[in-house]
Image (spheres, rainbow, N blue to C red):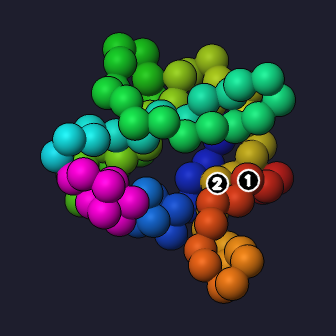
Amino acid sequence: MFEVTDRALRYLSELIARRGGRDITAIRLLRRARRIELRPDDERRGDLGFVVDARTVLVVDRALADAMRGLRLDVRRGEAEKPELHLSTQ
Protein backbone atom coordinates (compact mmCIF):
# COMPACT_ATOMS: atom_id res chain seq x y z
CA MET A 1 0.00 0.00 0.00
CA PHE A 2 1.00 3.63 -0.50
CA GLU A 3 2.54 4.94 2.73
CA VAL A 4 2.74 8.47 4.11
CA THR A 5 5.01 9.08 7.08
CA ASP A 6 3.90 11.00 10.16
CA ARG A 7 6.60 13.55 9.36
CA ALA A 8 5.08 14.15 5.90
CA LEU A 9 1.58 14.48 7.34
CA ARG A 10 2.76 17.02 9.92
CA TYR A 11 4.54 18.95 7.16
CA LEU A 12 1.32 19.05 5.09
CA SER A 13 -0.69 20.10 8.14
CA GLU A 14 1.72 23.00 8.72
CA LEU A 15 1.56 23.90 5.03
CA ILE A 16 -2.24 24.10 5.17
CA ALA A 17 -2.06 26.27 8.30
CA ARG A 18 0.41 28.66 6.66
CA ARG A 19 -1.55 28.89 3.41
CA GLY A 20 -5.02 29.55 4.62
CA GLY A 21 -6.00 27.21 7.39
CA ARG A 22 -9.74 26.82 7.14
CA ASP A 23 -9.93 27.91 3.49
CA ILE A 24 -7.97 24.81 2.45
CA THR A 25 -9.68 21.66 3.63
CA ALA A 26 -7.03 19.20 2.41
CA ILE A 27 -4.26 18.69 -0.11
CA ARG A 28 -4.82 16.27 -2.98
CA LEU A 29 -2.02 14.21 -4.45
CA LEU A 30 -2.46 13.96 -8.24
CA ARG A 31 -0.59 12.31 -11.09
CA ARG A 32 -0.19 14.55 -14.13
CA ALA A 33 1.78 13.30 -17.13
CA ARG A 34 4.53 11.45 -15.24
CA ARG A 35 4.61 13.97 -12.40
CA ILE A 36 3.10 14.00 -8.96
CA GLU A 37 1.43 17.26 -7.95
CA LEU A 38 -0.23 18.59 -4.83
CA ARG A 39 -3.33 20.79 -5.00
CA PRO A 40 -5.79 22.16 -2.45
CA ASP A 41 -9.01 20.16 -2.65
CA ASP A 42 -11.87 18.62 -0.71
CA GLU A 43 -12.11 14.98 0.24
CA ARG A 44 -14.33 13.01 -2.15
CA ARG A 45 -16.22 9.76 -1.77
CA GLY A 46 -13.84 6.87 -2.31
CA ASP A 47 -10.68 8.83 -1.51
CA LEU A 48 -8.00 7.52 0.77
CA GLY A 49 -7.62 10.14 3.50
CA PHE A 50 -4.64 10.71 5.80
CA VAL A 51 -5.41 12.36 9.12
CA VAL A 52 -3.42 14.47 11.61
CA ASP A 53 -5.01 15.59 14.87
CA ALA A 54 -8.52 14.55 13.72
CA ARG A 55 -8.19 16.53 10.47
CA THR A 56 -7.78 15.04 7.00
CA VAL A 57 -4.74 16.76 5.49
CA LEU A 58 -3.99 14.58 2.45
CA VAL A 59 -6.40 12.91 0.06
CA VAL A 60 -5.55 10.47 -2.72
CA ASP A 61 -7.82 8.80 -5.23
CA ARG A 62 -7.87 5.07 -4.40
CA ALA A 63 -6.88 4.08 -7.94
CA LEU A 64 -3.80 6.32 -7.70
CA ALA A 65 -2.99 5.02 -4.23
CA ASP A 66 -3.17 1.46 -5.60
CA ALA A 67 -0.90 2.42 -8.51
CA MET A 68 1.57 3.88 -5.99
CA ARG A 69 1.72 0.69 -3.95
CA GLY A 70 5.20 0.23 -2.52
CA LEU A 71 5.96 3.97 -2.47
CA ARG A 72 6.43 6.19 0.57
CA LEU A 73 5.87 9.95 0.88
CA ASP A 74 8.25 11.49 3.40
CA VAL A 75 10.05 14.77 4.14
CA ARG A 76 13.75 15.36 3.63
CA ARG A 77 16.06 18.36 3.57
CA GLY A 78 16.28 19.94 0.15
CA GLU A 79 18.20 22.89 -1.19
CA ALA A 80 19.18 25.44 1.45
CA GLU A 81 18.23 22.83 4.05
CA LYS A 82 14.51 23.54 3.57
CA PRO A 83 12.18 20.59 4.09
CA GLU A 84 10.58 19.13 0.97
CA LEU A 85 8.34 16.18 0.23
CA HIS A 86 10.08 13.16 -1.23
CA LEU A 87 8.60 10.04 -2.85
CA SER A 88 10.66 6.86 -2.62
CA THR A 89 10.30 3.10 -2.60
CA GLN A 90 9.56 1.51 0.77
**Disc 2/disc 1 C-alpha distance (Å):** 5 Å
Q: From the viewer's perspective, is residue 70 above or below residue 44?
A: below
Q: How many marks?
A: 2
Instruction: Tell me which residue sits at (39%, 60%) in the image.
Output: 15
- In the picture, the quarter occupied by the N terminus is top right
Q: Is residue 40 left or right of residue 63?
A: left
Q: Is 82 rendered above or below residue 73?
A: below
Q: Tell me where the magenta segment starts and ends, as one range.
A: 14-21
N-term mark: 2 or 1:
2
Q: x, y (%) of residue 18? A: 31, 63
Q: Amino acid at mark 2?
A: Leu
Does the magenta portion include 89?
no
Q: Nearer the viewer, residue 90 or 77?
A: 77
Q: Are marks 2 and 1 in contact (CB under 8 Å)?
A: yes
Residue 5 lies left or right of residue 88; in this view the side is left
Q: Position of residue 29 (x, y in %)?
A: 56, 36
Residue positioned 77% across, 43% down in the render = 70
Between 3 and 7, the one nearer to me in the picture: 7
Q: For residue 65, which quarter of the picture? A: top right
Q: Is residue 39 left or right of residue 70?
A: left
| Residue 88 visible in the snapshot | yes
Q: Measuring 79% from the left and 23% from the top, which residue is drawn there?
A: 33
Outermost residue on the bottom side: it is 81
Q: In the rendered image, which residue does mark 1 sit on?
A: 87
Taking the spot 20% from the left edge, 41% from the top edge, the residue there is 23
Between residues 2 and 33, which one lies in front from this camera angle?
33
Q: Nearer the viewer, residue 77 or 1?
A: 77
Which residue is under mark 2? 73
Main SS, magenta residues: helix
Secondary structure of residue under mark 1: strand
